[in-house]
Every structure is written in structure tokens, then in C-alpha cells.
Amino acid sequence: MFASSLRTGLRSSPFLRSAASNFSYRNKHTLILVRHGESTWNLENKFTGWVDVPLSPKGHDEVIEAGKLIKAEGLEPDVAFTSTLKRAIRTLWHVLEQTDCMWIPVEKSWTLNERHYGALQGLDKQQTVDKFGKDQVLVWRRSYDVPPPVVDRSSEWHPSNEKKYSSVSFPDEFTESLSTTLDRVLPFFNDTIAPQLKSGKTVIVAAHGNSLRALVKHLDSIAESEIAELNIPTGTPLVYNLDEDLRPIKQGGCIEPLQGRYLGDQDAIRARIEGVKNQTK
């Protein structure tokens, strides 16, 4: 009887309908993910990893548009996170400028960096296919737990040779798979990002294809066998509504297996996804 009376009251009372809507809003947590815009090495079709290359002119345009889409959606980030790589940092700057949110707190962490591609960094993707074969390169690029060949401390690509990582201890031989990328992304999400979401903050994360693949694998409970086929397009906002347990609330218009929703022209987004997929064809 009480439940029936409550439903009747909600239908008949504008005040109660508004209160119920506000309650629902307060219990929905918003997470905005943006992969950096096209970089100069994306344009040149090179394995980039932790090499600190800038955005291409197209990449700047992509993320300016991303910021405009976020603003048009009525989303206002309260706090921001990004990696220590300039293509993600610059992406975040553009988005925050377009949303009039450049004043909000920003935290940078190497744990949001792109996956380290080991000895593949700096190599042309198509030439690598020609040398090692399409199947082997696809395994290195998209498998869950098979890393590329390592680099040692004599390599310019070993992170111990960069000042920005001087406070971090890395093994003598280093490379990463998506699995080991998740091993660093997930603790940062749970310990640093999740508390901000649970406090009611709208959070934006500007990061990279593989650090975001790792994060959405966790959020959407994507199987290891399925994650190989998932590609995240550059410069395209991906918006998640999360419940109290920070599990996704599935939205209309999402592209499976994701439960978040990309903002923008859906045909163009699907074309960008195919563009990422075809980089080593």
C-alpha cells in the first residue's frame, strides 16, 4: 500500500517528481574519458608508447571539438587527471579551455601513460608488419598479456633515462602488455579517481588508447578474449554514468561492449575506430 501511494504521489506531485529526479542525479556519478588527439607519430604510423611526441595539427582540432561537445552536453568537470605525456596534457588543456574549466584541479600521473611498447617504440607500424608478420604484430598490439620485445637501460626508450621518471623504480628490462598496464592504471583509479567520483565530483581523464582500454576493461567487465578487438578513437569524449558502486549505467546509443556513450557524430566515430584498427593492415 505504501509503495502504491508513493508511486501515485510521485505522478501527481511536481515537487516530489523533482525531488526524485534530483535524488537520482545525486546518485549518478559522471566520468568523462578522452583519448588524446592525433599525435605526430599517429600521423606517421609509428609505435609511440612513452615517447613524448606532440599533437598533430589535426589532433589539436580534434580535441578542441571534443571540448565543445562536452560543453554542449552540459557537462562541467570538477577535477581532472592526465598522464605525464604532452599529447594527453595538451588534450586536457584544450578540453578545459573549451569548457571554461581551466581553473579546476589537475593531477598528472605516469600510471595513466600509454602502454610502453618496449623495443617497438619509434618503429613504423607497417614496416614492422612487413618484417615480423601481421599476426605477430597484432598479438603485440592488441593481445591482453603478450608484451613486445623489451628494452634495457642502454636504450633511449628505457624510462630510467628520463628525468620525469626519476622517482620511479623500473626493472632493467622493460616493456608492457595491456595486462601490466591495467596493473598500474587500476590502483590509481581505485585510490585516487574513485574517491573523487564517490564524493559527487564530475571527473575527466585525458589519457591514451591503451591506458583507457585497460580502464574500460575494468569498468565494463570486458573479457580478455574480447578486449583485443576494442579500439578507442582519438579526440572523442566517452561519457560514463556510474552507480553508487561505480558500475556503469548503460546508456542508449553506446557502442558495444562499452556502456559509456561517445559524444559526437556516430558514423564519424565508427570511422575513427576503424582507422585505429587498420593502422597495421
Image (tube, rainbow, N blue to C red):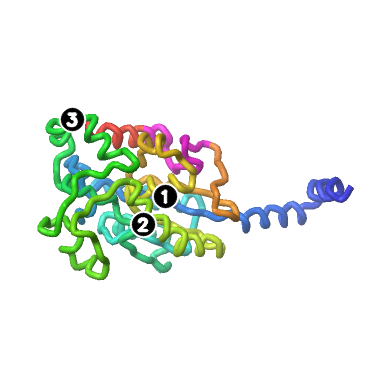
Q: How far separated are the C-alphas under marks 1 and 2?
A: 10 Å
Q: How far separated are the C-alphas under marks 2 and 3?
A: 30 Å
Placement of the C terminus among the 4 image quadrants: top left
Mark 1 residue element: helix
Q: Which residues are magenta?
A: 253-270
Mark 3 residue element: loop
Asked if residue 165 is positioned above or below residue 115 in the image, the reply reads: below
Asked if residue 104 is positioned above or below residue 125 in the image, the reply reads: below
Residue 213 at least partly seen: yes
Residue bearing mark 3: 133
The answer to which quarter of the image holds residue 134 is top left
Q: Earlier in the sequence, mark 1 or mark 2?
A: 2
Mark 2 residue element: helix
Q: Is residue 131 left or right of residue 186?
A: left
Q: How far separated are the C-alphas under marks 1 and 3?
A: 29 Å
Q: Residue sitting at 45 percent across and 64 percent down?
A: 192
Q: Amino acid at mark 3?
A: Gly
Q: Are marks 1 and 3 in contact (CB under 8 Å)?
A: no
Residue bearing mark 2: 184
Q: Is residue 93 left or right of residue 9?
A: left
The x, y position of residue 215, in whole percent, is 42, 50
The x, y position of residue 79, in whole percent, is 45, 64
Tag in front: 1 or 3: 3
Q: Earlier in the sequence, mark 1 or mark 3?
A: 3
Q: Residue furthest front?
A: 172
Q: Nearer the viewer, residue 251 or 174?
A: 174
| Other-residue count near label 2 (Cα within 10 Å), few / some / many at <14 / 14–19 / ≥20 | some
Q: Nearer the viewer, residue 107 or 165?
A: 165
Residue bearing mark 1: 215
